[in-house]
């Protein structure tokens, strides 16, 4: 449900409708807290967004740099939401799985005395 001719829409409603936040209240709270910036400036939830604006959203320890392509008032599906903006932020770095402690196979039974000593040594225990 795109607004005709790119009419202005409140910023809290827009970031909610393009699925950056789960609820409208959560979106308004993020705007008030300064986690959403419009053209590089912190704004109030009632600020108007039009196509061509840049919106920066800090969410889940990652910054999204969105260029507004279309304005929507109501929440839309994910495929439609992705057509309303272009994300210029670099993708987050890949998460590397590096266990901090040695992992034992499930069902391997109790550790042997040797394995227990190795685990204690690794953890900085005795010795």
Image: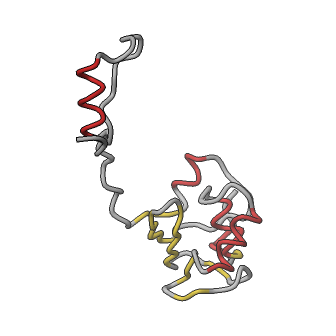
Residue at 74% over, 82% down: 46
Left or right: where does residue 39 sit relative to residue 106?
right
Q: Position of residue 34 (x, y in %)?
A: 60, 80
Residue at 55% over, 82% down: 38
Q: Is residue 19 above or below residue 126?
A: below
Left or right: where does residue 21 sit relative to residue 61?
right
Q: Residue furthest front?
A: 127
Left or right: where does residue 67 sit relative to residue 105?
right
Placement of the N terminus among the 4 image quadrants: bottom right
Placement of the C terminus among the 4 image quadrants: top left
Snapshot quadrant of residue 73: bottom right
Q: Is residue 125 above or below residue 16?
A: above
Residue at 58% over, 66% down: 70
Foreground residue among 56 and 17: 56
Foreground residue among 51 and 17: 17
Q: Position of residue 67 (x, y in %)?
A: 47, 71
Q: Is residue 106 above or below residue 86?
A: above
Q: Is residue 108 above or below residue 53?
A: above
Foreground residue among 62 and 84: 62
Q: Position of residue 87 (x, y in %)?
A: 43, 63
């Amino acid at each position: 449900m795109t607004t005709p001719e790119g009419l202005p829409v409140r910023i809290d409603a827009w970031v909610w409708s393009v699925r950056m936040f789960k609820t409208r209240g959560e979106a308004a709270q993020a705007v008030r807290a300064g986690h959403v910036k419009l053209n590089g400036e912190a704004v109030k939830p009632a600020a108007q967004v039009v196509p061509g604006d840049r919106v920066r959203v800090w969410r889940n320890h990652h910054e999204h740099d969105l260029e507004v392509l279309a304005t929507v008032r109501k929440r839309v599906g994910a495929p439609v939401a992705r057509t309303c903006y272009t994300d210029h932020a670099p993708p987050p770095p890949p998460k590397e799985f590096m266990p901090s402690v040695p992992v034992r196979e499930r069902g391997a039974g109790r550790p042997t005395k040797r394995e227990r000593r190795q685990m204690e040594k690794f953890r900085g225990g005795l010795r």
